[in-house]
Image: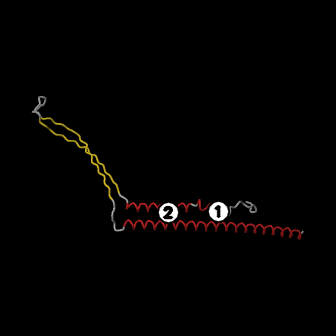
Amino acid sequence: ADLGTPRVVSTLDECVSIALTRHPRIGTADSGVEAGRARIGQARAGYLPQLSGDWATTRQKSSFSSRTGGPSDTAGGAVSQSNAFNFHQGSVSLSQTLFDFGQTFAAIRAAQARTDSLAADADATRQQIVLEVKQSYFGLLAARRLAAVAEETVRSNEQQLALARGRNE
């Protein structure tokens, strides 16, 4: 690799912008904040009416005997029949919490506080990534300058070597 050939380097602002849009830790932090917002909605659901339903079906067989005096009856007129019956049962209920001694309100406040904490963590993550990008960017600039200085030192030493060889000859 030729150290004297400069590569195309983005500006610091471009590097920061790329990091803020593509870094996986930011996506994770943002997902945590969204999950926190969803938990606030779940906590608020305690104030909403609750509707539930149930449905059950059972099938029962019953057999019964009856005595009839008709001419087709055999053995004294006893007839045995077996029938199946379906029994259906359904229920719907609606409930509404009127008072729960502030438990739902406390759950909402706790969920909001957790979401605020997650948002602060996400901001801290962004700031940490910006710091890391800036440190890396300036580290790269320093390494390039050190490489340029090292190349200049090599050239100077080569000139001194050539001059020493000339004097020696």
- At label 2, the amino acid type is Val
The quadrant of the picture occupied by the N terminus is: bottom right
- Badge 2 local density, few (<14 within 10 Å), some, or many (20+)? many
Q: Tell me which corner region of the image, top left, top right, bottom left or bottom right, holds residue 101.
A: bottom left
Circle 2 sits on which residue? 33
Circle 1 sits on which residue? 15
Up-down: is 95 above or below 58?
Answer: below
Q: Tell me which corner region of the image, top left, top right, bottom left or bottom right, holds residue 107.
A: bottom left
Residue drawn 77% across the image and 66% down it: 151
- Could you tell whether 148 is left or right of 40 in the image? right
Q: Nearer the viewer, mark 1 or mark 2?
A: 2
Q: Secondary structure at mark 1?
A: helix
- Could you tell whether 77 is left or right of 107 in the image? left
Give the colour scheme of this rendering: secondary structure
Residue drawn 63% across the image and 63% down it: 16
Q: Are marks 1 and 2 in contact (CB under 8 Å)?
A: no
Residue drawn 51% across the image and 66% down it: 119
User: Can you give x and y, in whole percent of width and height, for residue 117 in the image?
Assistant: 49, 68
| Sooner in the amino-acid sequence: mark 1 or mark 2 | 1
- Badge 1 local density, few (<14 within 10 Å), some, or many (20+)? some
Q: Return the residue nearer the eye: 69 or 150.
A: 69
| C-alpha span from label 1 to label 2 | 25 Å
- At label 1, the amino acid type is Cys
Residue drawn 68% across the image and 63% down it: 11
- Could you tell whether 72 is left or right of 22 in the image? left
User: Can you give x and y, in whole percent of width and height, for residue 147 in the image?
Assistant: 73, 67
The quadrant of the picture occupied by the C terminus is: bottom right
Picture mark count: 2
Which residue lies most toward the top here? 71
